[in-house]
Image (tube, helix red, strand yellow):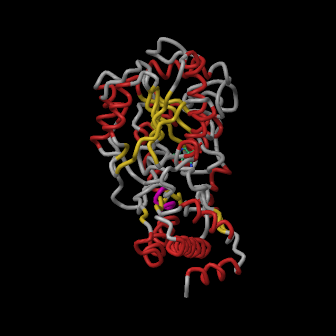
């Protein structure tokens, strides 16, 4: 059967499937239902009343629990609300309005600000920098992280380069974990801007899919060793550990940066939701508790990643390449004419993240990358979606052959 005939049959089925966003499935959320009955006590370890205002930095016992997982000592961690993305957004606002340690002026006074954006990358990072008129320069991602020759050259040559977005472990969307050498070079590289910052979004620090997890070198420690302690802003959250809409988030950095951050957030809030913090401490207990909980997630989503890999292998052959990540939430599929494939899938009732979303300004110059988010649908729906996607890839390839269009 031709791809055209398969596609007509696909459209006939009137599917309504969604692979757009990396959301946990209801069964994953069920793993954390006990949170809804907690906390048993509203008293923090130091005896304070969690129901009241105060403790801007967050409960020490929660910071201690997460310190080893995010590679920042507890005294230099801050607990935020349910969204680490909000912390990233607000950090940039703070830097625009209040000089970061080491800066000669506020970022809003700079004639131009540039951020390096490893691609493919996370669209919501790019949305934040775009919102503030920050120029985004793509940097290619390799199998061991961003191309460090390019990064080192750009940060050394141009003082307008103030930041780089990094998802260093099981990256969104490529699944790549930065190598020790990449992390060391990020820690050590000379930068033209004295106030250059690495936005180290360790969103998938504990989100392993195998029993042989990737190890990530300790950027905050390495940066401090190289005299660049203030260079690193670390972010993480429990959005994909407990409840995506009701977790806790973390900001971690050097003493000077934490002081700067708390100085700014003290103007924003009288204190965070400590009842939710207590709930998370009682539920997760310690790093071993987090690891055991994440294993249950892996049991639910591991088969989904395997299914995508199997269907793509059977149906696509050499029409595309894709990643087989050892953790995280995404698979990155590379095919010719990605935007056309996404449009065909949409017309057949299969919603995919727009092609180009993985690049700054939504523009993938090669029109190749499609981010697949397999966690939310159950296996039968996921199989239908990937089978349908494969039909669309074959159809676009077939139409390209007929029209003589280059891949
Ligand atoms: N960072 C990355 C790399 C992500 O993939 C996501 C979720 N898709 C987030 C941050 C969002 O985190 P939060 O829910 O803590 O805002």
Q: Quadrant of ligand 1?
A: top right
Quarter where residue 161 is shown: top left
Q: Residue at x 38, y 28 (%)?
A: 155
Quadrant for the N terminus in the image? bottom right
Residue 65 in view, yes or no: no
Task: Point out residue 407 in the picture as x, y percentages from the top left corner.
Answer: 46, 64
Quarter where residue 306 is shown: bottom left
Which residue reaches farthest front?
A: 404
Determine the main secondary structure of the stretch shown in magenta: helix
Q: Nearer the viewer, residue 1 or 316?
A: 1
Q: Residue at x 33, y 28 (%)?
A: 223
In the displayed structure, would residue 401 be above or below residue 219?
below
Q: Nearer the viewer, residue 10 or 56?
A: 10
Q: Residue at x 41, y 33 (%)?
A: 72
Tally of numbered discs? 0
Task: Point out residue 58 in the picture as x, y percentages from the top left corner.
Answer: 57, 30
Bounds of the magenta span? 294-298
Q: Is residue 208 left or right of residue 380?
A: left
Magenta stretch containing residue 295, yes or no?
yes
In the displayed structure, would residue 133 be above or below residue 266?
below
Residue 21 in view, yes or no: yes
Magenta stretch containing residue 364, yes or no?
no
Task: Point out residue 76 in the picture as x, y percentages from the top left corner.
Answer: 45, 27
Task: Point out residue 3 in the picture as x, y percentages from the top left corner.
Answer: 56, 80
In the displayed structure, would residue 9 be above or below residue 99?
below
Which residue reaches farthest top?
A: 104
Q: Nearer the viewer, residue 103 or 215?
A: 103
């Amino acid at each position: 059967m031709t791809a055209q005939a398969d596609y007509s049959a696909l459209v006939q089925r009137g599917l309504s499937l969604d692979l757009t966003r990396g959301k946990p499935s209801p069964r994953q959320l069920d793993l954390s239902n006990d949170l809804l009955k907690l906390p048993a006590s509203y008293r923090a370890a130091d005896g304070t009343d969690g129901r009241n205002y105060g403790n801007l930095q967050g409960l020490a016992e929660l910071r201690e629990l997460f310190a080893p997982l995010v590679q920042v000592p507890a005294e230099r961690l801050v607990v935020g609300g349910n969204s680490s993305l909000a912390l990233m957004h607000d950090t940039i606002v703070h830097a625009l309005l209040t000089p970061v340690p080491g800066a000669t002026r506020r970022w809003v006074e700079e004639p131009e600000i540039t951020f390096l954006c490893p691609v493919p990358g996370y669209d919501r990072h790019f949305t934040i920098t775009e919102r503030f008129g920050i120029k985004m320069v793509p940097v290619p991602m390799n199998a061991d992280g961003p191309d460090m020759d390019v990064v080192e050259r750009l940060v050394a040559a141009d003082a307008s380069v103030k930041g780089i977005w990094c998802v260093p472990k099981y990256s969104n969307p490529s699944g790549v974990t930065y190598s020790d050498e990449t992390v060391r070079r990020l820690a050590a590289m000379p930068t033209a801007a004295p106030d250059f910052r690495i936005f180290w979004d360790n969103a998938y620090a504990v989100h392993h899919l195998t029993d042989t997890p990737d190890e990530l070198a300790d950027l905050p420690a390495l940066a401090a060793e190289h005299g660049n302690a203030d260079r690193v802003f670390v972010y993480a959250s429990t959005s994909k550990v407990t409840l995506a809409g009701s977790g806790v988030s973390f900001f971690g950095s050097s003493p000077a940066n934490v002081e700067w951050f708390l100085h700014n957030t003290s103007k924003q809030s009288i204190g965070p939701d400590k009842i939710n913090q207590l709930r998370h401490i009682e539920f997760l207990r310690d790093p071993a508790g987090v690891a055991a909980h994440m294993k249950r997630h892996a049991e639910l989503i591991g088969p989904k990643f395997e299914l995508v890999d199997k269907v793509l292998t059977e149906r696509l052959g050499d029409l595309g390449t894709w990643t087989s990540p050892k953790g995280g939430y995404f698979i990155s599929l590379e095919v010719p004419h990605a935007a056309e494939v996404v449009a065909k899938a949409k017309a057949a009732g299969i919603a995919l993240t727009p092609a180009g979303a993985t690049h700054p300004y939504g523009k993938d110059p090669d029109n190749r990358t499609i981010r697949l988010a397999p966690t939310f649908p159950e296996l039968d729906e996921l199989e239908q979606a990937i089978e349908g996607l494969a039909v669309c890839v074959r159809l676009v390839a077939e139409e390209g052959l007929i029209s003589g269009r280059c891949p």
